[in-house]
Image: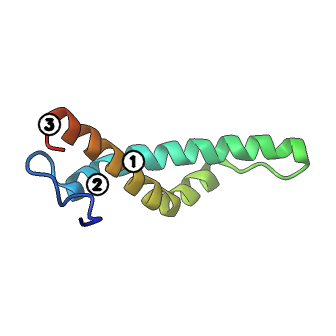
């Protein structure tokens, strides 16, 4: 049995296209969460993260998060198509 998330798929969107489409939304969610985390840090006396800094941090941090999101969405699409 292989560990490739796309090896069992027979139809639908390719993993790469789905990854590219979902990246914008995943990176946006990461940016919002980083900004909120920065606001909560103020309770500990740490400086807040600016919205621009949260966006800049979300660009690289969104890549691994998006890989997980894309695997999850691809799995749900395969399940709906009855491919699994």
In the rendered image, residue 35, in percent from the top left (x then y), is placed at: 65, 44
Instruction: Look at mark 1 in the image and give the residue it sits on.
Output: 69
Q: Nearer the viewer, mark 1 or mark 3?
A: 3
Is 35 left, or right, of 80 in this rendering? right
Label whose residue precedes the other's in the sequence (2 or 3)? 2
Of tags 2 and 3, which is closer to the observer? 3
| SS for dot 2 | helix
Q: Is residue 77 left or right of residue 83?
A: right
Say which residue appears at 48% left-offset and 59% top-offset.
Answer: 59
| Crowd band around label 3 with a 10 angstrom C-alpha radius: few (<14), some (14–19), many (20+) | few
State the CA–CA distance, disc 1 to disc 2: 11 Å
- Which residue is disc 3 drawn over? 82
Q: Residue furthest right?
A: 45
For the N terminus, give its image quadrant: bottom left
Q: Residue furthest left?
A: 11
Which one is in front in this view, the residue at disc 1 or the one at disc 2?
1
| Residue at the (19%, 44%) spot, across then down | 84
17 or 68: nearer the eye? 68
Q: Earlier in the sequence, mark 1 or mark 3?
A: 1
């Amino acid at each position: 049995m292989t560990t490739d998330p796309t090896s069992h798929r027979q139809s639908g969107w390719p993993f790469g296209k789905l990854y590219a489409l979902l990246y914008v939304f995943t990176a946006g969610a990461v940016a919002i969460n980083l900004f909120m985390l920065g606001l909560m840090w103020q309770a500990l006396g740490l400086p807040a993260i600016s919205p621009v800094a949260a966006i800049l941090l979300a660009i690289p941090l969104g890549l691994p998060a998006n890989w997980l999101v894309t695997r999850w969405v691809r799995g749900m699409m395969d399940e709906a198509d009855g491919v699994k």
